Image: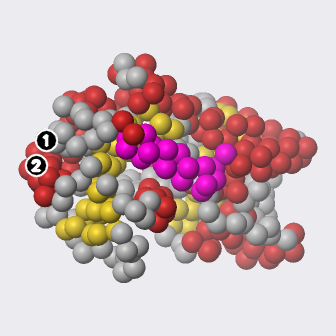
Amino acid sequence: MRIAINASSLTSDHFEILLRLANRFNEHIFLFFFDSEPAISTLPSNVHPVIIKPQQSIRWFSKTIYQRQLAAALKKHKAGIFISEAFVSSHTNVPQILISPDLTYIFYPALLNKKQFSTAKKNTPKFLQKAATIVVNSYFFKNKIEQQFGIDQQKIKVVYPSLTKKIQPVSEEEKIVVKEKYAGGNEYFIYHGIISMEQNLVNLLKAFSFFKKRQRSKMRLFFTGKPGLKYDEFIHLLASYKFKNEVMVKANESHSKNEKLLSCAYASLYIPFYESEGKEILETMSWQIPLVVSNNGLLKEYCGEAALYADPDNFNDIADKMMLIFKDEQKRHDLIENGTRELKKFTESEADNTWYEIIKEIERNDVKIG
């Protein structure tokens, strides 16, 4: 069988999973469609890169021309399955696997402009109906798709993200050194993710103010990760923040430095209005620090008993959870222990085995979608 993959649409996690899948199905040919020469130099012998003329818009699914290019490439290369993230092609009868359909317009439309909202509302239901199989990263999204769009639950498969890196515990001596270097020897809360106003960082700052006024501690607050669209707006806001001298922003730091800061934090604060991926909170959990997260479905499914949950719209609730984790050392310890158990759900072998069964099922059924 010849399995085509829209590689340019994939997140790095899905790209790595599908490369491993190619190694496992070495009797099949994998056609990786790229919009430019791939940066990766070494591919398995059964992976053939195919270059398709790039489009101007990142949101390819709104481009009819690109959809037709995909259909032509699938026909030319005699693909038996097509795998793509966020969208599928409406111009082919090749069985298609849709990864991570974008449901932002349902859960948090404020993140989208008017055109993005209308495009997603129009096309997402079509993609879901067209796909032979839909792959999502949680039962929360599986249930939502089934209920909202009337999709047969057997068509929707759940593949959790996997953590491949083994974490080496950090000694208490190392933690003291890191805290002396970056936090003046003080404990600190940490937010790790996209640094932007859309991530509910205003309510996080309000909660930290409430915490400082109530506890009168020397606790610091760190922000680490990559700048988002409204990063500059957030930095401007910080300039007039009462506790600005106790807030540190570490944007675009190296992966190793982020890991160092995470591993020594007192607790993680991650309170977005909407979360579609969850990989960063799993990485944070793996460093054996307790979590305070939003009470939305995806994060509750991933974190289980390893977190305290707060209403992202209520900074008082966020502050209450910060104070609880600060005052109750046994609760903090229990959350860390629970995190070790929760992480066992997110293994590379589990993800690979689920993908293997998805491919085998399509092979057996030889699904044809009109």
Question: Is 220 positioned to the left or the right of 223 in the image?
Answer: right
When the figure is inspected, residue 56 is found, relative to residue 261, above or below; the finding is above
- For the residue labelled by badge 2, is the local secondary structure a helix, a strand or a loop? helix
Horizontal and vertical percent position of residue 360: 44, 45
Q: Foreground residue, 103 or 80?
A: 80
Residue 102 seen in render: no
Q: Which residues are magenta?
A: 345-363
Q: Which residue is mark 1?
A: 91
Q: Quadrant of residue 43?
A: bottom left
Contact? badges 1 and 2 (CB < 8 Å)? yes
When the figure is inspected, residue 331 is found, relative to residue 36, above or below; the finding is above
Q: Estimate the spatial distance between the alpha carbons at disc 1 and disc 2, rounded to whole Å.
A: 6 Å
Q: Which residue is mark 2?
A: 68
Q: Residue at x 76, y 69 (%)?
A: 168
- For the residue labelled by badge 1, is the local secondary structure a helix, a strand or a loop? loop
Q: Check the picture and name the quadrant holding the C terminus.
A: top left
Q: Foreground residue, 205 or 200?
A: 200
Question: Is 311 positioned to the left or the right of 333 in the image?
Answer: left
Q: Residue at x 70, y 37 (%)?
A: 304
